[in-house]
Image: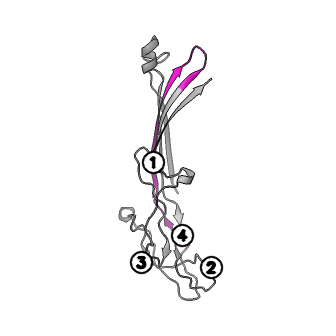
């Protein structure tokens, strides 16, 4: 529903041609010049999801029947835990041969808070545009848990419980990852 992304890039003003140290050469230039710091802050609310029932009362052979809903079902954010993400007691199994009245996407899952940080160091190779760039990159630097939606099958013992985190296959909502790289520009 809501998404906020702030990205920043800051090249340190140190080294040849920069604000501080315009006459540097040799070792001081190689050590203190060419540093760049980058960051990405990502905040977004959780994805909507729909409750379903663990029991088929329609006798249609199809799964995914909707439950009956007696009230909102969403808990205030200060009451949500991974053991109780939404109020399961506000949902019930519909009567035989009837459809449940719960709507589509009426509940909201856990959101994402992630901070990525990278540090680059550039080394010039000769007088042309050739250079080497060393990179240290950390994704989800604070290692904040990125929980997936809870079990939404009303009638199941684990309904309302968040039991997984992250999505490794798509590199989304993952735990902390750190990588080092070297890039050659020529």
What is the CA distance from the residue labelled 1 to the residue labelled 3? Answer: 32 Å
Q: Earlier in the sequence, mark 1 or mark 2?
A: 2
Mark positioned earlier in the residue sequence (4 or 2): 4
Dots 1, 4 in contact, CB < 8 A:
no
Residue 90 placement, left or right of 101: left
**Residue occupying the far left of the picture:** 78
**Where residue 184 sits: x, y (%)?**
58, 26
Was residue 112 drawn as part of the magenta stretch in this picture?
Answer: yes
Residue 62, disc: 2
Q: Which tag, 1 or 4, sits closer to the chain's start?
A: 4
Pointer 1 residue: 114
Please identify the residue farthest to the bottom as the structure is shown.
Answer: 96
Would residue 78 be seen by someone viewing this image from the given angle?
A: yes
Which is more toward the observer, 159 or 179? 179
- 95 to 10, vertically: above or below: below
Q: CA distance from mark 1 to mark 4?
A: 25 Å
Lower position in the chain sequence, tag 2 or tag 3:
2
């Amino acid at each position: 529903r809501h998404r906020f992304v702030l990205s920043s890039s800051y090249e340190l003003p140190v080294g040849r041609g920069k604000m501080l140290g315009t006459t540097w050469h040799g070792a001081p230039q190689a050590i203190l010049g060419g540093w760049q710091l980058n960051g990405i802050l990502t905040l977004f609310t959780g994805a909507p999801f729909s409750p379903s029932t663990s029991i088929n009362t329609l006798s249609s052979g199809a799964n995914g029947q909707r439950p009956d809903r007696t009230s909102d079902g969403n808990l205030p954010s200060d009451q949500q835990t991974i053991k109780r993400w939404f109020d399961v007691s506000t949902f019930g199994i519909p009567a035989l041969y009837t459809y449940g009245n719960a709507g589509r996407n009426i509940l909201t899952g856990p959101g994402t808070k992630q901070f990525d940080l990278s540090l680059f160091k550039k080394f010039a190779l000769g007088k042309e545009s050739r250079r080497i760039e060393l990179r240290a990159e950390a994704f989800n630097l604070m290692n904040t848990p990125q929980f997936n939606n809870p079990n939404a099958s009303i009638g199941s013992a684990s309904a309302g419980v968040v039991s997984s985190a992250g999505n490794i296959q798509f590199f989304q909502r993952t735990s902390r990852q750190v990588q080092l790289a070297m890039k050659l520009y020529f």
